[in-house]
């Protein structure tokens, strides 16, 4: 199995967990936005990257270092740690029946993704394994993170299993000791009310 396959399988477990459980301080080098007619989505999505300014996690948040110690994922008290791959860490907000209403995950880079191809790579991975449809809503490169630099994509997709609609912010972040991926996701119907909390978790992501 190649590195790309390992990466896709890792993402697939995170998405299936969701289904089964149903910057002003940044140098933005590129920004692409797709919008629905009649909506102000372009402004909203662009402002999401402007709000992605590195900041320490608030007091009371828990921290999960990656097993390889190249990054630290922080999450709020409303979430709890959940099972993930052996090289990854994840936290989620369970809802009725065990459904994941919010999901955070971090994993080391394992495939051919890089800062330049990140948005296309992420969408290709979703299409290959889990999604019947995928849409890139916005993408940016040259974003500052604590300890490094990253590329991010905001996308929404519909799963093949159950036709569940999710929205996510996924970032590839390079630090001195390696690169890793952080994903913050929620059902599309909850994205608007959850976006600020998920953005804060991504802004608190620290690489080494």
Image (cartoon, grey):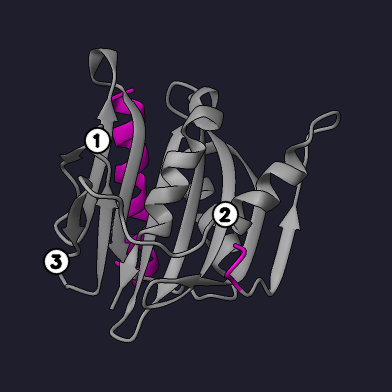
Residue at the (45%, 74%) spot, across then down: 112
Specify start and end residues of the magenta stretch as a single range.
1-26
Q: Secondary structure at mark 1?
A: loop
Residue 193, horizontal then vertical, whole percent: 51, 28
Q: Main secondary structure of the magenta part?
A: helix
Q: Is residue 149 left or right of residue 71?
A: right
CA gap between label 1 and label 3 equals 20 Å
Pointers 2 and 3 in contact (C-beta within 8 Å) = no
Pointers 1 and 3 in contact (C-beta within 8 Å) = no
Residue at the (56%, 30%) spot, across then down: 192
The N terminus, quarter of image? bottom left
Residue receiving disc 3:
67
Q: Secondary structure at mark 3?
A: loop
Residue receiving disc 2:
51
Residue 145, horizontal then vertical, whole percent: 44, 70
Residue at the (44%, 33%) spot, across then down: 186
């Amino acid at each position: 199995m190649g590195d790309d396959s390992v990466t896709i399988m890792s993402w697939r477990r995170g998405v299936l967990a969701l289904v089964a459980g149903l910057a002003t301080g940044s140098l933005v080098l590129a920004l692409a936005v797709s919008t629905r007619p009649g909506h102000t989505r372009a402004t909203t999505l662009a402002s999401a990257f402007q709000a992605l300014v590195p900041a320490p996690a608030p007091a009371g948040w828990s921290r999960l270092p990656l097993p390889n110690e190249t990054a630290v994922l922080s999450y709020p008290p409303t979430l709890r740690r959940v099972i993930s791959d052996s090289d990854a860490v994840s936290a989620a907000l369970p809802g009725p029946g065990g459904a994941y209403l919010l999901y955070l995950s971090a994993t080391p880079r394992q495939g051919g993704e890089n800062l330049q191809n990140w948005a296309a790579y992420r969408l290709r991975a979703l299409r290959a394994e889990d999604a019947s449809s995928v849409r890139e809503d916005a993408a940016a490169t040259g974003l500052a993170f604590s300890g490094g630099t990253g590329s991010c994509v905001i996308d929404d997709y519909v799963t093949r299993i159950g036709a569940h609609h999710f929205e996510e912010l996924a970032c590839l972040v390079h630090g001195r000791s390696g690169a890793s991926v952080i994903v913050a996701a929620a059902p599309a119907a909850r994205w608007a009310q959850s976006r600020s909390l998920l953005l804060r978790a991504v802004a608190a992501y620290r690489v080494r």
